[in-house]
Image (tube, grey):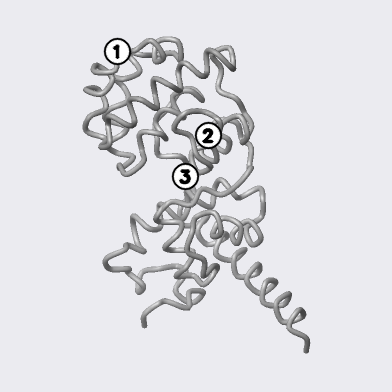
Amino acid sequence: MSPRRTRRESTRSKQQRTEEILRRLKEEYPDAKCALLHQSPFELLVATILSAQCTDKRVNLVTPALFERFPTPAAMGEANIEELEELIRTTGFFRNKARSLKGLGQALMADHDGYVPDSMEALTALPGVGRKTANVVLGNAFGIDEGIVVDTHVQRISKLLGLTDQKTPEKIERDLMELVPRSDWTLWAHLLILHGRSVCKARRPACGNCVLADLCPSAEP
């Protein structure tokens, strides 16, 4: 058997296993959705920027007062930077994030008439927005499955499941995009994040209570 043939069959086997992983996780977490509270693409974009190196729970505590004070891109772009820093201080790296949010508001007003764009290229051109953030906004605010969000849970659990052996989020995303059906790209991250928080915890995975144990090469007996 040629190496090319072996690789193709290996990918097909992973795809079949991934489909079963998805099926089980959908049963286990039927209400999986974005944990960041938001009422508009702008609010989700801001919340996702704040979520870097911060928990979603903490972001959700901060954003109500933030959006009450600066509810629109125009208001955010005109914000006093010290006031903005104080409002988001508890999310960490607040000075960098404040500069990004102020710049974001200004860029949305200058280049997009105050609206959040719905393309990867336009989003990643905005201050403070990388591919991961753009994927969150496209998938959850616009229903566009452009890519797969690779956060720490997705990265760790996808490796444990043997679906990738890559080390960078970009390469892990490419591997997953070959295995996960495109219609489930956004959902995949929500499912693995919930599974990572409730069962497959970084410090002590509860393999005995895991619905994926027989599909996971890393599962402990």
The mark that comes first in sequence, 3 or 1, is: 3
- The residue sitting at 67% across, 77% down in the picture is 10
Classify mark 3: residues with Cα within 10 Å, few (<14), some (14-19) or many (20+): few
Q: CA distance from mark 3 to mark 2?
A: 19 Å
Give the residue at x 49% y 70%.
Answer: 161
Q: Which residue is mark 3?
A: 31
Q: Is residue 17 above or below residue 61?
A: below
**Residue, disc 1:** 80
Q: What residue sits 63% from the left and 34% below the top?
A: 121
Image position of 175 (left or right of 126): right
Please name the amino acid that badge 3 sits on. Asp
Q: Is residue 14 above or below residue 74?
A: below
Q: Position of residue 106 (x, y in %)?
A: 47, 16
Q: Position of residue 30 (x, y in %)?
A: 49, 49
**Could you tell me the amino acid type at mark 1?**
Asn
Above-or-below relation of 116 to 209: above
Query: Residue 64 appears in which quarter of the rendering?
Result: top left
Rounded to the nearest angstrom, the CA distance separating label 1 from label 2 is 26 Å
Labelled disc at residue 98? none
Residue 200 quadrant: bottom left
Please name which of the two marks, 3 or 2, marks the residue nearer to the observer: 2
Mark 1 residue crowding within 10 angstroms, few (<14) / some (14–19) / many (20+): few
Q: Say which residue label 2 marks.
A: 137
Image quadrant in which the C terminus is located: bottom left
SS at circle 2: helix
- Depth-wise, is mark 3 or mark 1 nearer the camera? 1
